[in-house]
Image (spheres, coloured by chain):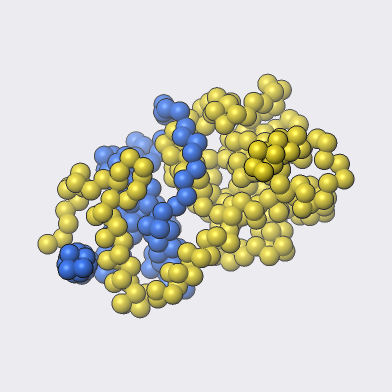
Chain colours: A yellow, B blue
Amino acid sequence: MTESHDDKDDHHQDELGHASSYYVILEEAIRVLLIEKGVFTAQEVETQIDGMDSRSPAVGSMIVAKAWTNPDFKAWLLRDAVEAVSSVGVDMNNQPDLVVLENTAEIHHVVVCTLCSCYPRAVLGVPPAWYKGREYRSRVVVDPRGVLEEFGTYLSDAINVRVIDQTADRRFLVLPSRPEFTDGWSADQLEALITRNSMIGTAIPLTPAQLKAETATQS
Amino acid sequence: MTGVHDIGGQDAGPIDLSDHALSSFDQRVDAMLMLLVHPNRGAFRVDALRRAIESYRQQDYDSLSYYERWLGAVRKLVVEQDILSEEEIAAKIAELKAQKVGG
């Protein structure tokens, strides 16, 4: 017999969001069948999982740091992000369009996917759990400043906050403003200041003092 | 009329900022979906995945985890596209369960 869709109450995920045993076995069944039918191979599944690690916020940080230190690259990035990021080795084949939004002293951008979880995966990897959750998706569009405060981000009233809703076909990456007191820093040094959330817009980059404090606690 | 997924602007509680890494289940579902929608295979498109996810009933949309929703949608779409049948899936689930009991 096929599993009825009305008996799901027996196999909800637990409170930590771990998949229920029903879904774990369903995943295995579908994967094994698709491998048996030659839709894909077990090796391709493994390769795909390994490849997930190659797309991470480190890619975004590298791009932002390059934009901060190279005005020509920054202009290119804002004009044609797909071409610009491809030029530094990001594989944009079969990826949705990418647009970069520049934060300035007047405008702060924050991105969301109210309908689901569209995210600039090509340059940031998979989205964090909160990005996919009901609370962020529901609230950031009506109370962006309140939401940013929950992330510990307090913006001056003089800054205009723009919330951008992602689409399936076009993804947005935030280019945060370069922090003060970083004159003369190399792109490599700057990368350490560029957090994932600063490229989503729920945070701003670390200051040199914050980086120093963070490094001190870790060692 | 808005669908179950169309939640922008609704009231909701505080945001859980904790970062949890994807489980191996999450990773496998993610990988399977990416392989299926890749143009080399073209089992279905992301738009079809969206339709499947957006057509969940409210109680399922709310109670399933993110990747459980994806997996349920993949199941619906591979059946719709005649890649797998519900009977094959049920038989494979029974076979896997029997293997696990048998150790």
Residue at 30% over, 46% down: A13
Residue that extends furthest to the top in the rendered view of this protein = A157
- Horizontal side of A213 relative to A145 (left or right) equals right
Quadrant housing the C terminus of chain B: bottom left
At 12% from the left edge and 62% from the top edge, which residue is drawn? A1
Name which residue lies at 76% across and 31% down: A105
Left or right position of B12 against A203: left
Residue situated in front as seen by the camera: B40 or A29: A29
**Residue A39: % across, % down:** 37, 74
- Residue extending farthest to the right is A184
Residue appearing at x 33%, y 56% in the figure:
B71
Where is residue A18? Give x, y as percent. 34, 48
| A202 sits left or right of B30 in the view | right
Vertical placement of B84 versus B69: above or below?
A: below
Report x, y in % for residue B91.
17, 68
Left/right of residue A144 with respect to residue B64 in the rendered view: right
Placement of B15 over or under A23, stated as above or below: above
* Residue furthest to the left: A1
Q: Quadrant of residue B1?
A: top left
Q: Nearer the viewer, residue A159 or B101?
A: B101
Report the label total.
Answer: 0
Location of residue A38 with respect to A29 vertically, above or below: below
The answer to whether one can see residue A74 in this image is: no
Residue A61 x %, y %? 68, 50
- Confirm whether residue B10 shows in the render: yes
**Foreground residue, A181 or A34?**
A181
Q: Is residue A83 above or below residue A66?
A: below
